[in-house]
Image (tube, rainbow, N blue to C red):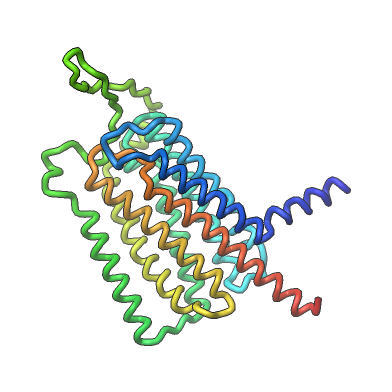
């Protein structure tokens, strides 16, 4: 009985808002410096395998932590924004986690192009769940904006859409060059004449089921990237609306942080879409991808802030 109570007490301490915020800040700062110091240029250099694996680990740690906090909210029936909203966000984050694992296996283990892989199935589910969760929150709160606020939302969303169309348009010279999304598995060594010569790296043989899945998803890789980009544009517009609508309200802090999380995902996804179409031989791990971690931890912080608001309200009602 004592061990059970100690376990509950430890869990409660881990899920305290101040601890969640503290660990989110620590993870964000560590990730930022890690990407800044070791990511290197966007192309032209083979990133070390230990670094590329570490970036996936940092992303997955953030996804697991934030997903658990969102699920904690989803299991409570007293959440001001609704338990379904947080449950959907939690499912979305764990879907992204699974997709990220497949993305990493495709790129790092089997040396395949991860654009168009089994992970895309879970990335699609991530966007569907996240759009549903944010949409339910906005509809349930009956957000009302003034005309000038709608103008701000429309203007920023239009700009995001124009940027998305430019990002998704490959450069004219791409037809005569190597496919932008191809994974470069070469290294350079000096020749007797002193000129660097490429040396082909060994590519592990992918299992049959991996090749089958790759054949299924690969033709839709470009279309799926476009789907992600347009989902980001929609979510970006919703994020701006949330920032304006929840400014100064009782749930303003949580939903402003949620909006910031969406914007961070927008930045990271736009960068990946740009790299896929405009950077030849791009490898994952460039510095801007740290925004996935920033966005993920902010979903967790937002969930913690709303849970804290709920418990404070319950204490007030109970007269404690």
Q: Please state which of residues 250 and 192 is positioned toward the viewer in this rendering.
A: 192
Q: Please state which of residues 48 and 3 is positioned toward the viewer in this rendering.
A: 48
Tell me the quadrant of the picture where the C terminus can be found: bottom right
Residue placed furthest toward the bottom: 147
Q: Is residue 146 left or right of residue 94?
A: left
Q: Is residue 22 above or below residue 155?
A: above
Q: Is residue 215 left or right of residue 102?
A: left
Q: Please state which of residues 128 and 199 is positioned toward the viewer in this rendering.
A: 199
Residue 93, horizontal then vertical, whole percent: 51, 53
Residue 314, horizontal then vertical, whole percent: 73, 74
Residue placed furthest toward the right: 1
Q: Is residue 85 above or below residue 249?
A: above
Q: Residue at x 29, y 55 (%)?
A: 226
Residue 212, horizontal then vertical, whole percent: 35, 33
The quarter holding residue 253 reads bottom right
Residue 224 visible (yes or no):
no
Residue 113 visible (yes or no):
yes
Q: How many marks?
A: 0
Residue 177, horizontal then vertical, whole percent: 15, 38
Residue placed furthest toward the top: 192
Q: Is residue 282 left or right of residue 69?
A: left
The quarter holding residue 162 reads bottom left
Q: Residue at x 62, y 56 (%)?
A: 20
Q: Is residue 151 above or below residue 232?
A: below
The quarter holding residue 111 reads top left
Q: Please state which of residues 27 and 225 is positioned toward the viewer in this rendering.
A: 27
Q: Residue at x 43, y 49 (%)?
A: 290
């Amino acid at each position: 009985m004592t061990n059970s109570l100690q376990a509950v007490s430890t869990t409660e301490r881990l899920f305290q808002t101040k601890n969640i915020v503290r660990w989110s800040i620590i993870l964000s700062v560590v990730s930022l410096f890690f990407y800044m110091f070791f990511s290197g240029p966007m192309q032209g250099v083979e990133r070390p395998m230990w670094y590329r694996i570490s970036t996936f680990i940092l992303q997955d740690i953030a996804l697991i932590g934030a997903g658990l906090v969102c699920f904690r909210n989803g299991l409570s029936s007293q959440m001001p924004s609704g338990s379904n909203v947080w449950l959907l966000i939690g499912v979305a984050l764990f879907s992204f986690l699974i997709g990220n694992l497949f993305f990493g296996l495709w790129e790092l283990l089997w040396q395949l192009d991860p654009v168009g892989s089994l992970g895309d199935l879970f990335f699609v589910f991530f966007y569907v769940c996240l759009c549903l969760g944010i949409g339910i929150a906005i509809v349930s709160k009956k957000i009302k904006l003034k005309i000038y606020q709608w103008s701000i939302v429309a203007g920023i969303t239009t700009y995001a859409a124009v940027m998305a169309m430019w990002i998704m348009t490959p450069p004219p010279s791409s037809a005569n060059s190597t496919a932008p999304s191809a994974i470069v598995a070469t290294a350079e060594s000096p020749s007797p004449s002193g000129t660097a010569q490429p040396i082909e790296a060994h590519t592990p043989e992918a299992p049959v089921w991996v090749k089958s899945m790759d054949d299924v998803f690969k033709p839709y890789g470009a279309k799926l990237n476009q789907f992600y980009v347009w989902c980001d544009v929609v979510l970006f517009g919703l994020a701006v609306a949330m920032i304006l609508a929840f400014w100064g309200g009782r749930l303003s802090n949580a939903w402003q942080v949620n909006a910031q999380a969406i914007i961070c995902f927008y930045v990271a996804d736009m960068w990946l879409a740009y790299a896929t179409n405009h950077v030849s031989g791009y490898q994952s791990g460039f510095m801007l991808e740290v925004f996935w971690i920033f966005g993920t931890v902010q979903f967790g912080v937002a969930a913690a802030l709303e849970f804290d608001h709920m418990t404070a309200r319950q204490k007030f009602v109970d007269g404690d």
